[in-house]
């Protein structure tokens, strides 16, 4: 489904990703852990080419998305269309469009990008918003919603494009503690329906319960990966032990 | 003392020439209306060209930035003189275009509109840019990650939000533009102050100038108050946090 091979990403002198290899099977939920600055978010942003990697290859459904006609830059539009119609992303800061209602947030891309009619887009958006428990907020504007509600709208917005893979970038980190569960519940449901998901998170409980695989990153490389129980309960690497120790101490 | 007062406020002079000066002021408003609309559009085009992404568009960005910098750095009068002093004599251009009399307006009107549009487009581009750059990066990223092109993201997500952040600076530029329409008098468009100048030359009395300026005052003062109001309203909004896209 998705395969990363030797992915490198630099910002000026700073090498954020230093050769990342990762395989994700269809329907698999991969949780990515690691300290801040370890390159987790950048990895996700490479997968949907918000940050095209400089070296390495990313295969999405068999297609190398880093190799366009210009090769290696990831700026070729056929690549971007291919990737972004298959990969949905949800951000830490929600990034809802504040000048649009909840319904319009969800319908904008299907209408503008896929050229769907208003009726078709509205119908689908309503069903999705219903599914994330916001069927009664269609005409509200984002600023009137709680963080948890906004994040659920953002998930519905990404799902409206029928993605094959969903990327979640610390989607609960900006939320008040009591709102985390409602968002994680949506993720759980998605996972149970067989969505392929890459989840950058600090929620170890969620990783253990929902993840098929846990990946621990540090310093721009994958330090350790495996089944959640193995990585979380009996980590092999010193860095992983230390990190998990610090997180669990809280 | 009375002589001094009369030099500026001779109501007989004002009354005798009120209609002519007002006619002139309407010409100012006419230049303002068209140049204002065109500059708003041209400025947005410039601002968007400046925001084009990726290395591919580096030359376009460079040229746009150079244009904006140059037109902000040269006197408007210079642009007006350059245009009116060159275009009419470029004989390879059809006469109807190099000496336009469209819609019953004389050629100085069109030279003035062109010059002010070119210059104020650059000013407006800077105002739009401030608005565009105030929109968090995450907005474009969200739009792009949903499959929208850069153009779609600008059109449907960034620009609609950006324009709500800049009415006050935009209005300031428009006030300046209205006042700068008087510069077109230099190339013999019969605007308020040029008419007033003819009156002054006849009467050796400055009251017509005062009258002309008063007409600008009547329009610009309320506009200036409106700017203050918009700024204040914007500040309370920001203070309440509704501007911050969390």
Image (cartoon, helix red, strand yellow):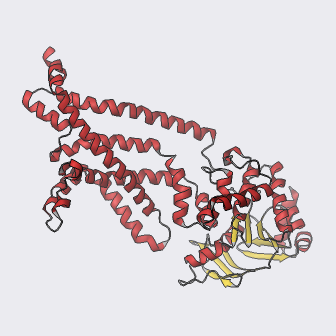
Q: Position of residue B131 (x, y in %)?
A: 49, 51
Residue drawn at 73 percent across, 48 percent down: A137
Residue drawn at 76 percent across, 58 percent down: A127
Q: Which of B164 and B245 is in front in this view?
A: B164
Q: Where is residue B202 in the image (x, y as percent from the top left)?
A: 7, 30
Residue at the limit of the structure toward the left, as seen here = B202
Q: Quadrant of the C terminus of chain A?
A: bottom right
Work out whether residue B71 can be spotted. Answer: yes
Q: Where is residue B5 in the image (x, y as percent from the top left)?
A: 18, 18
B14 left or right of A240 in image: left
Q: Which of B172 and B16 is in front in this view?
A: B16
Residue drawn at 53 percent across, 66 percent down: B150
Residue drawn at 92 percent across, 71 percent down: A229
Q: Quadrant of the N terminus of chain A?
A: bottom right
Q: Where is residue A129 in the image (x, y as percent from the top left)?
A: 75, 56
A181 left or right of A151 in image: right
In the displayed structure, B75 sits above or below B29; it is: below
Q: Which of B70 and B81 is in front in this view?
A: B81
B87 left or right of A75 in image: left
In the displayed structure, B112 sits above or below B199; it is: below
Residue at the limit of the structure toward the top, as seen here = B2
In the displayed structure, A244 sits above or below B120; it is: below
């Amino acid at each position: 489904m998705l395969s990363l091979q030797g992915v490198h990403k630099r910002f000026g002198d700073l090498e954020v990703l230093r050769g990342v290899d990762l395989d994700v099977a269809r329907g698999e939920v991969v949780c990515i852990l690691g300290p801040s600055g370890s390159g987790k978010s950048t990895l996700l942003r490479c997968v949907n080419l918000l940050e095209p990697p400089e070296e390495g290859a990313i295969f999405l459904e068999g297609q190398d998305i880093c190799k366009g006609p210009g090769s290696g830059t990831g700026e070729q539009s056929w690549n971007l269309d291919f990737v972004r119609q298959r990969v949905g992303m949800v951000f830490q800061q929600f990034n809802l469009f504040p000048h649009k209602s909840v319904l319009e947030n969800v319908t904008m891309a299907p209408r503008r990008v896929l050229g769907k009619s208003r009726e078709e887009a509205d119908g689908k958006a309503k069903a999705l918003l219903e599914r994330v428990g916001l069927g009664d907020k269609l005409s509200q504007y984002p600023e009137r919603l709680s963080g948890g509600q906004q994040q659920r709208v953002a998930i519905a917005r990404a799902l409206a494009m029928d993605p094959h893979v969903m990327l979640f970038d610390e989607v609960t980190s900006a939320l008040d503690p009591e709102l985390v569960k409602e968002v994680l519940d949506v993720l759980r449901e998605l996972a149970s329906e067989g969505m392929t998901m890459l989840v950058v998170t600090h929620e170890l409980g969620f990783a253990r319960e929902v993840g098929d695989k846990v990946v621990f990153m540090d310093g721009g490389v994958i330090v350790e990966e495996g089944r959640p129980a193995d990585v979380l309960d009996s980590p092999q690497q010193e860095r992983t032990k230390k990190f998990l120790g610090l997180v669990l101490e809280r | 003392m009375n002589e001094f007062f009369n030099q500026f406020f001779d109501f007989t002079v004002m009354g005798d020439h009120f209609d002519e000066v007002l006619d002139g002021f309407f010409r100012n408003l006419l230049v303002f209306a068209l140049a204002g609309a065109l500059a708003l559009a041209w400025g947005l085009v410039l601002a968007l060209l400046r925001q084009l992404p990726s290395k591919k568009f580096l030359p376009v960005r460079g040229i746009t930035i150079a244009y904006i910098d140059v037109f902000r750095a040269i006197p408007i009068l210079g642009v007006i003189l350059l245009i009116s002093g060159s275009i009419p004599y470029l004989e390879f251009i059809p006469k109807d275009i190099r000496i336009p009399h469209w819609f019953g307006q004389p050629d100085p009107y069109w030279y003035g509109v062109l010059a002010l549009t070119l210059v104020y487009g650059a000013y407006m581009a800077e105002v739009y840019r401030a608005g565009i750059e105030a929109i968090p990066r995450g907005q474009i990223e969200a739009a792009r990650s949903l499959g929208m092109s850069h153009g779609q993201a600008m059109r449907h997500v960034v620009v609609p939000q950006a324009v709500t952040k800049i009415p006050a600076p935009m209005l300031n530029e428009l006030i300046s533009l209205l006042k700068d329409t008087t510069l077109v008098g230099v190339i013999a468009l019969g605007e308020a102050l040029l008419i007033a100048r003819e009156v002054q030359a006849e009467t050796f009395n400055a009251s017509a100038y005062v009258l002309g300026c008063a007409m600008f005052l009547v329009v610009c003062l309320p506009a200036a108050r409106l700017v203050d109001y918009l700024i204040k309203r914007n500040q309370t909004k920001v203070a309440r946090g509704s501007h911050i896209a969390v």
